[in-house]
Amino acid sequence: MKQKVLVICSSLRPNSNSELLAQQFAKGAQEAGHSVEILSLKNKQLQFCTGCMACLKTPHCVLQDDANAIVEKMRTAQVLCFAAPVYYYGLPGQLKTLLDRANPLYSCDYSFRDIYLLTASAELPDSASDGSVNSLQEWIRCFEQARLAGVVQGGGANDPGEMALHTDKLQKAYEMGKNI
């Protein structure tokens, strides 16, 4: 069954390792017949959540920036994929800000049921904390039927584009997209 897939890349670096993972995931999903959009948080204006909770009464955040349009795309996607670098054992701030601003999704009829997380980190997987994964898992648990389907860690990717040398990681991202 063809699904609408939204891939959100949160790295701000040009030619980032997260982008390479996102592109491979998207390629696999497209080849499997799904409709895929890759959305980068580069050059997006995302204000911090103020905790006003107005979004619980309205279907959107009262702050006027790029987050509202992104959250609407999230709401209508059937599959979400987040591609993120791991900075100091955590998610990058721009992704955390977007997830905070996605609060209107909690009380609406969102379409997604599957959530994927692709991460690129400068340390080997066995030496890195799983803090970033746990943070997103907690966010995912807020959605009744969503699930974390997998994580791809860079295993030493630090410099821009270095992920291209990790063909096994790129292949895993591709296969995750292909197997949606």
Image: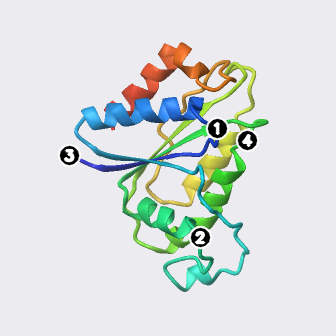
Q: Position of residue 119 (x, y in %)?
A: 59, 33
Q: Position of residue 155 (x, y in %)?
A: 64, 19
> Quick one: 19 or 137, which is closer to the camera?
19
Of circles 2 and 3, the one toward us is 2
Please say if the residues under marks 4 and 2 sit with CB atoms less than 8 Å apart: no
Q: Earlier in the sequence, mark 3 or mark 4?
A: 3
Please say if the residues under marks 2 and 3 sit with CB atoms less than 8 Å apart: no
**How many numbered badges does the structure rendering display?**
4
Q: CA distance from mark 1 to mark 4?
A: 17 Å
Report the disc number at residue 13.
Answer: 1
- Kind of residue sitting beneath label 4: Gly
Q: Earlier in the sequence, mark 2 or mark 1?
A: 1
Left or right relative to 57: residue 36 = left
Q: Position of residue 131 (x, y in %)?
A: 72, 39
- Kind of residue sitting beneath label 2: Asp
Q: Earlier in the sequence, mark 3 or mark 1?
A: 3
Q: CA distance from mark 3 to mark 1?
A: 34 Å
Instruction: Say which residue appears at 59% left-offset and 49% top-offset.
Output: 42
Label 3 sits on a secondary structure element that is loop
Q: How is the rendered protein coloured?
A: rainbow
The quarter of the rendered structure image containing the C terminus is top left
Q: Earlier in the sequence, mark 1 or mark 4?
A: 1
Q: CA distance from mark 3 to mark 4?
A: 34 Å
| Residue at the spot of label 2 | 65
Please say if the residues under marks 1 and 4 sit with CB atoms less than 8 Å apart: no
Q: CA distance from mark 2 to mark 1?
A: 21 Å
| Residue at the spot of label 4 | 90
Of circles 4 and 2, the one toward us is 2
Label 4 sits on a secondary structure element that is loop
